Image (tube, rainbow, N blue to C red):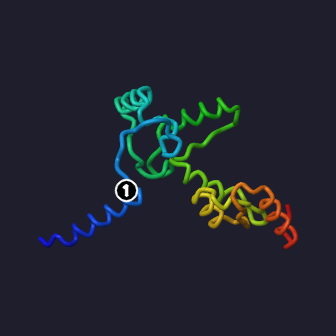
């Protein structure tokens, strides 16, 4: 085997190290505010025990498709009932991920004639939901209240109502 391809990768890695851009896997440390486990549920003993108990009861595991097609279980309905009671609401609906929740809400709730103003740095799911939905949408500069107001003013000047 020719060592040239490996030498090229080695040179690339050395270049990254010189620029202090070489990353390695490190043990977990500190507080996590940047991953999908910012609540620390992955290492929760209580959650792990609940999963083991659910499996022992025969609760299906895995995505299995949407709840409408194949994935509903009594635990889903109980979780939603408990959440509704906790928040004092008539009902609650849980989604499999924040991405799906944002996409679903922004394609279903805003209607034609509505305006959505999104922070330009909002999660991609919000941008994609807005693009797929019926409402008009405009982007505003990140954390810029004046940009939001300007977007609404411009929309109204162009005939938008609201």
Residue to which mark 1 is pinned:
22
Most extreme residue toward the front is 18
* Quarter-of-image position of residue 78: top right
- Please report the residue visible at 85 percent of the width from the left and 60 percent of the height from the top: 162
What residue lies at 36% left-to-right and 43% top-to-bottom? 26
Q: Position of residue 129 (x, y in %)?
A: 62, 61
- Answer with the quarter of the image where residue 157 lies: bottom right
Q: Nearer the viewer, residue 100 or 152?
A: 152
Is 138 on the left-hand or right-hand side of 36?
right
Q: Quadrant of residue 128?
A: bottom right
Whether residue 68 is situated above or below residue 55 in the rendered picture: below
Q: Depth check: 41 or 131 in front?
A: 41
Query: Residue placed at 26% from the left, 64% from the top?
Result: 10
Between 77 and 36, which is closer to the camera in this rendering? 36
How many numbered marks have been drawn onto this rendered protein structure? 1
Q: Secondary structure at mark 1?
A: loop
Neighbour tally class for label 1: few under 14, some 14-19, many 20 plus, Cα within 10 Å: few
Q: Position of residue 31 (x, y in %)?
A: 50, 36
Q: Is residue 135 above or below residue 57?
A: below
Residue 162 left/right relative to 71: right
Q: Name the residue furthest left.
A: 1
| Position in image of residue 32 (x %, y %) | 49, 39
On-image quarter of the N terminus? bottom left
- Front residue of 13/124: it is 13
- Rendering coords of residue 51 (x, y %): 40, 32
């Amino acid at each position: 085997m020719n060592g040239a391809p490996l030498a090229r990768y080695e040179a690339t890695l050395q270049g990254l190290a010189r620029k202090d851009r070489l990353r390695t896997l490190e043990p977990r440390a500190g507080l996590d505010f940047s991953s999908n486990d910012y609540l620390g549920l992955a290492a929760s003993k209580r959650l792990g025990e609940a999963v083991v108990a659910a499996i022992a009861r025969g609760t299906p595991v895995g995505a299995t498709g949407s709840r409408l097609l194949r994935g509903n279980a009594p635990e889903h309905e109980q979780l939603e009932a408990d959440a509704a009671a906790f928040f004092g609401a008539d009902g609650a609906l849980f989604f499999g991920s924040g991405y799906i929740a944002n996409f679903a809400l922004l394609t279903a709730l805003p209607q034609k004639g509505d305006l959505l103003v999104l922070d330009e740095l909002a999660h991609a799911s919000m941008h994609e939901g807005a693009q797929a939905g019926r409402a008009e949408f405009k982007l505003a500069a990140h954390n810029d209240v004046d940009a939001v107001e300007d977007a609404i003013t411009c929309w109204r000047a162009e005939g938008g109502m609201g």
